[in-house]
Every structure is written in structure tokens, then in C-alpha cells.
Amino acid sequence: MAIVAVVAAVAVPWYRDYVATAREGALGKRIATMAIFQEETRLRTGSYGAGSWDPAAGEESLAAAIGWQPATDDGTTFIVTADADAWTVTAADAGGATLCRVLPANDPCAQNE
């Protein structure tokens, strides 16, 4: 029984870290897809698009601003601020993972430091 307790004490934190890393990776992949739409918007209009994506709150302005929407609606929200030189996106999934990026510099936002 003691061996099982020791293994569980080691395995559970590793598993939690794995799940958190996987969630952040999924958010990062969606942000990378959004970046393509942002660059196309900047080429057409001269600045990046701003808006948010939260169907639960009835907010889907990113679709109109840059033509982007997530491939699946799993409760993930995205908030984008932008100007002519850069854009910032904060993404949060239903499981509580958050990721913030400033692009095109690709520097982490202050919340992730």
C-alpha cells in the first residue's frame, strides 16, 4: 500500500503538469491559426483586427473583424486588442488554462511571466 501511495504522490503532479501543458499547447495552436488571419487583415487594411470570441456571451466579433473563428466550440474564449504594429490575444479554455501572447513579437504577456 505504501508503494502505491508513493507512486501516486509522484504521478499525480506529473499528470497535472502534462494536462496543463497540453491545454496551453492547444491554445497556442489556435493562436497560431489566428495569426494567419491577422496578417491577411493587416495586408488588406493596414492594421490588425481586434475583437473577441465568446459564443456563450454572444460575442463573436473576431469573425467579422478578421474572418476567424475556432474550428470547434468547446467554451474557449479569445480577447484580441490590436493596432497597426502588434496585437495581443488572451485565450482561456473551459478547463481554466489561459495563454496570452503579443504578436508579431511573440513575447509572452505579463500574466504569463
Image (cartoon, rainbow, N blue to C red):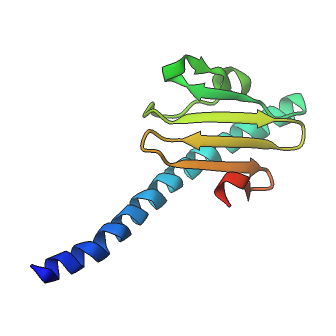
Residue 1 quadrant: bottom left
* Vertical placement of residue 113 versus 66, above or below: below
Give the residue drawn at x 58%, y 51%.
Answer: 28
Q: Can residue 31 be seen by looking at this rendering?
A: yes
Residue closest to the eye, 40 or 96: 96
In the rendered image, residue 93, in percent from the top left (x then y), is placed at 49, 41
Looking at the rendered structure, the number of numbered marks drawn on it comes to 0
In the rendered image, residue 8, in percent from the top left (x then y), is placed at 23, 72
Give the residue drawn at x 67%, y 52%.
Answer: 111
Give the residue drawn at x 42%, y 34%.
Answer: 74
Residue 13 quadrant: bottom left
Q: Farthest top residue?
A: 58
Give the residue drawn at x 64%, y 24%.
Answer: 63
Quadrant housing the C terminus:
bottom right
Say left or right for 26 vs 113.
left
In the rendered image, residue 56, in percent from the top left (x then y), is placed at 48, 22
